[in-house]
Image (spheres, grey):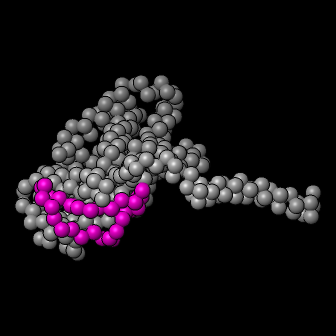
Amino acid sequence: MDARDASPRNKLALIWLVLPLAALAAAIAWLVTSDLLGSFDNGVPPVENLTFERTILSSDGIATRVRASGSDPMMIAQVLVDDAYWQFEQTPPGPLSRGQSAWIHVPYPWVQGEAHVIKTITNTGATFEHEIPVAVTSPTQSNGTLLFQTLLGVFVGIVPVSIGLLFYPALRGVGQPGMNFLLAMTVGLLAYLMIDAAGEAFELASQSAAIFQGQIMVVFASAASFLILMAVGRRHGAPTGLALATFIALGIGLHNLGEGLAIGAAFAAGSAGLGTFLILGFAIHNITEGIGIAAPILKKRPSLITFPALTLLAGGPAIIGLWIGSLAAAPQWSALALSIGAGAILQVIIEVGSYLARSNGRGSAALYSPSVLSGLIFGVAFMYATAMLVKI
């Protein structure tokens, strides 16, 4: 078939592609202009929903960011703090359309250490509440604050991973049972991180605006992350050696990004629970991550630059998470980051398990050996026990 025959066929295919879309556009236009649903209007007010995403306490009062997710635009008419009506300023002003956010500022003389309740009332009479359990001044951002958060991210993410990788020379002499133990331990700690990330993602998703469909977002983001990384990782066959270590570091890094978001959000909320004990707890909790990254390359001799690169990939996202979480914390974005991390970790678990089975030459039977089972149990148990230091 020459080009002259193909041209009419291409035009016809384009027409059949555009025609259904034109029909859909015409149907939507008719539905909007004809006011077909007007006959069903019995005076019931539209469905309204308002989510409180972030609250900042300062000497000027209380500022809170809200997001509307109702069926129609909604207007905030009144604001109460502790059951008392207060003047408020809304930025931007006017009705909030579906999905739109705005800041509500109330010059309320809040009391340090006390609990306060903010209540908004719309022009239809719908009310929405938000509780501040313990009122403390929200930290302000400055170069000094960002430097402090960077140092904290280094202690939480980079230091423990680098300490774990320092075990690399000592671990090179382990035999096959020792390798099996370390790889299984990696699977165990990754399994704990995956469940922990998924649980936190679902919890944060439940706090987000209904428009984001938090629970579904977590599932689909995890699935997409898993499938994309599986496709990338299997382009040239199952990953081994340095490639597998890189995927482990990437999965851990995405989890640490979500962990950093949570810590940053706690700082933005003025949480007083992030003390030295908690920082040390995070460091101890994450040490095995470095050992897990080193496990697939114990039989290799990577260049020295490989180790700081893997450390930055696994631990560096904690710093980025701290910055983002303290500057623009919102539950839906933290949930999204954690769900992507959970999907990435699942991909790594499958690849490490597959590598473990292949490296022994026994297939799936190797997964039931004493060294593998003990390593798996140790990995989960260590992460569970050290998590007691960081859960508040």
Q: Residue sitting at 40 percent across and 43 percent down?
A: 215
Taking depth in this image into account, of 179 and 346 the one nearest to the observer is 346
In this orientation, does residue 323 appear? no
Q: Residue furthest bottom?
A: 143
Residue span colored magenta: 72-101
Q: Residue sitting at 49 percent across and 36 percent down?
A: 354
- Seen in the picture, residue 347 relative to 77 is either above or below; the reply is above
Q: Residue sitting at 37 percent across and 51 percent down?
A: 45
- Seen in the picture, residue 261 relative to 287 is either above or below; the reply is below
- Seen in the picture, residue 164 relative to 349 is either above or below; the reply is below
Taking depth in this image into account, of 218 and 284 the one nearest to the observer is 218
Taking the image as shown, residue 268 lies to the left or right of residue 42, namely left
Image x and y of residue 26, in percent? 66, 58
Image x and y of residue 90, in percent? 27, 69
Taking depth in this image into account, of 278 and 174 the one nearest to the observer is 278
Q: Quadrant of residue 53?
A: bottom left
In this orientation, does residue 38 appear? yes
Taking the image as shown, residue 161 lies to the left or right of residue 278, namely right
Asked if residue 82 is among those painted magenta in the image, a careful observer would answer yes
Please count the marks in the image.
0
What quarter of the picture does the N terminus occupy? bottom right
Taking the image as shown, residue 52 lies to the left or right of residue 249, namely left
Asked if residue 297 is among those painted magenta in the image, a careful observer would answer no
Image x and y of residue 4, in percent? 92, 64
Image x and y of residue 323, in percent? 29, 65
Taking depth in this image into account, of 388 and 291 the one nearest to the observer is 388
Q: Residue sitting at 55 percent across and 43 percent down?
A: 238
